[in-house]
Amino acid sequence: MVDGYYQLLMRESDIPLTAVSTHSGMLWEWLVMPQGLSNAPATFNRLVTQLFRPMRQFVQTYFDDIFLHSRASEWKTAVEAHLGHLREVLLCMRENRLYANINK
């Protein structure tokens, strides 16, 4: 995925907890999950795991990496099965507004 943590919006009540003051007195607040929060990795991993749990027969995730594996069956070749699985994953990502890194 592209910038995994930055794709997750912060809960509105938690935004003030991310505030940072600069030396010029400006106040910055994160609207998306920053990488420096102690629970950010666990929160992100939990979200990705829950989203793809229904596809666990052919999808495994590790943080922002999504691994697909497909096999041939009586009705489909391995390529046909893989393309179907890929469509399911991309549809899930689209529905949840997650963006893929085309270079991966």
Image (spheres, grey):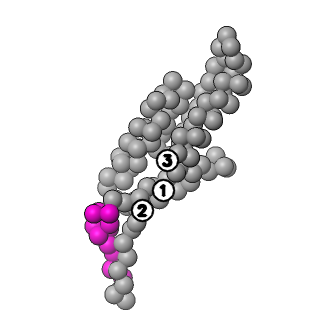
Which numbered dot is residue 96? 3
Q: Secondary structure at mark 2?
A: loop
User: Which residue is denoted by mark 2 in the rendering?
Assistant: 32
Q: Quick one: which residue is furthest to the front in this view? A: 95
Residue shown at 36% from the left, 53% from the top: 40
Can residue 29 be found in the magenta stretch?
Answer: no
Q: Position of residue 96 (x, y in %)?
A: 49, 47
Q: Secondary structure at mark 1?
A: helix
Dot 3 or dot 1: first in sequence order is: 1
Dot 2 or dot 1: first in sequence order is: 1
Label 2 neighbour load within 10 Å: few <14, some 14-19, many 20+: some
Mark 3 or 1: the one toward you: 3
Residue 79 in which image quadrant: top right
Q: Which residues are magenta?
A: 12-22
Residue shown at 50% from the left, 32% from the top: 60
Q: Amino acid at mark 3?
A: Asn
Q: Is residue 1 visible?
A: no
